[in-house]
Image (tube, grey):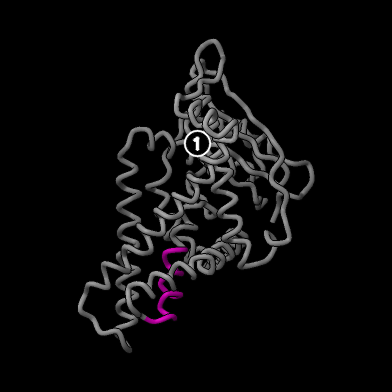
């Protein structure tokens, strides 16, 4: 089976696929047509090739690209029958305020705010909660506190995903997420990219970003245990400083398991992330699969540069 490094992201009524040379965004318009935006993928730099460093760098770049794609899909999803792209009053105000550079400012501000909220909710809050417990800070107490912190972190993460899944709009996003995985599976198995062929495959994929987030949760337990347990301020600083390290390790583990899914140990390592995808993916309809196929076809290359 072909193993590709092509990946994607579900959007508002659409999907983004990122290939070795191009990025393709396909969005279903209200009139039923598919709007396609294709552009060159960001060039790889020396930093993005360094193992354990590239993880955090690629994560930030992916977040910026993802926010841009989300804004684009939101505009297309609001397009009227006359085919003109709608633009919200907020976007118009921001563009006037920043002399045309408003979108870039909003994108980077959104990414930074998202990272800050994620760190606060999934990293600092669990540490604060466990810090309130009367457990000694030496010896086995340190191990116990870090294990409890990891457990609280995972519980908050699962609760967040579950509550998000209850929203109608998010369910549509989960369906596009499933369409992304099914389409990549179809391509990796060498089948022609048709709706009927894509429908045969699973909505779960070992290289999913959901699996990456779960790996971050698990690896953080091990890494944070190594630095002990200190005052709330010191704990917070140490955890923030270790986030790039945790992300780097999780990225390498995800890539390795994605390359060697046939190994029994790799299946065990990827199992929790695959199970979590029961919450973050849904079976797509034919229209959503068509959108995924359109995006996929526009990032496939003739050479083998998309293989691991």
Q: Secondary structure at mark 1?
A: strand
Of all residues, the one furthest to the top in this rendering is 82
Dot 1 alpha-carbon crowd within 10 angstroms: few under 14, some 14 to 19, many 20 or more = many
The quadrant of the image that shows the C terminus is bottom right
Of all residues, the one furthest to the bottom in this rendering is 139
Q: Which residue is at a point 71% across and 39% down the rendered structure image?
A: 40
The image quarter containing residue 98 is: top right
118 w.r.t. 82: above or below: below
**Residue 218 is inside the magenta segment:** yes
Q: From the viewer's perspective, is 16 left or right of 119?
A: right
> Residue 127's spot in the image, x, y percent?
32, 69
**Residue 158 is inside the magenta segment:** no
The magenta region covers 216-228
Q: Which residue is mark 1?
A: 11
> Residue 174's spot in the image, x, y percent?
43, 39
Q: From the viewer's perspective, is 226 left or right of 190?
A: left
Q: Which residue occupies the foreground of this view, 274 or 133?
A: 133
Most prominent secondary structure in the magenta stretch? helix
Looking at the rendered structure, the number of numbered marks drawn on it comes to 1
Query: From where the camera sits, is residue 201 visible?
Result: yes
Q: Which residue occupies the foreground of this view, 193 or 114?
A: 114
Of all residues, the one furthest to the right in this rendering is 303
Q: Which residue is at a point 31% across and 88% down the rendered structure image?
A: 138
Q: Which residue occupies the foreground of this view, 20 or 204?
A: 20
Query: From where the camera sits, is residue 286 visible?
Result: no
> Residue 253's spot in the image, x, y percent?
56, 65
Of all residues, the one furthest to the left in this rendering is 134
Q: From the viewer's perspective, is 290 left or right of 217?
A: right
> Residue 81's spot in the image, x, y percent?
51, 11
Q: Which residue is at a point 45% across and 28% down the rendered structure image?
A: 90
């Amino acid at each position: 089976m072909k193993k590709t490094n092509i990946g994607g992201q579900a959007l508002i009524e659409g999907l983004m696929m990122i290939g070795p040379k191009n990025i393709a965004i396909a969005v279903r318009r209200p009139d039923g047509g598919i709007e396609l935006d294709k552009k060159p993928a960001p060039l790889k730099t020396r930093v993005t090739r360094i193992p354990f460093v590239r993880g955090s760098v690629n994560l930030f770049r992916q977040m910026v690209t993802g926010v841009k794609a989300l804004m684009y899909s939101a505009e297309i999803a609001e397009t009227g029958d006359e085919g003109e792209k709608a633009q919200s009053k907020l976007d118009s105000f921001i563009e006037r305020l920043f002399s045309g550079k408003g979108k870039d400012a909003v994108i980077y501000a959104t990414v930074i705010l998202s990272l800050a909220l994620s760190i606060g909710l999934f990293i600092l809050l669990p540490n604060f909660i466990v810090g309130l417990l009367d457990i000694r800070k030496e010896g086995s107490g340190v191990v116990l506190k870090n294990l409890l912190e990891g457990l609280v972190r995972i519980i908050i993460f699962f609760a967040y995903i579950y509550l998000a899944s209850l929203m109608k709009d998010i369910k549509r996003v989960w369906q596009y997420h499933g369409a992304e995985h099914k389409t990549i599976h179809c391509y990796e198995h060498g089948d022609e990219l048709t709706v009927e062929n894509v429908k045969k495959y699973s909505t779960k994929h070992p290289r999913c970003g959901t699996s990456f987030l779960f790996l971050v949760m698990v690896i953080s337990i091990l890494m944070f245990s190594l630095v002990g347990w200190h005052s709330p301020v010191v704990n917070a600083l140490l955890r923030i400083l270790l986030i790039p390290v945790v992300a780097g390790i999780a990225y390498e583990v995800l890539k390795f398991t994605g390359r060697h899914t046939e190994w029994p140990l790799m299946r065990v390592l990827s199992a929790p992330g695959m199970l979590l995808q029961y919450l973050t993916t849904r079976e797509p309809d034919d229209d959503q699969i068509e959108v995924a196929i359109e995006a996929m076809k526009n990032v496939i290359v003739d050479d083998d540069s998309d293989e691991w």
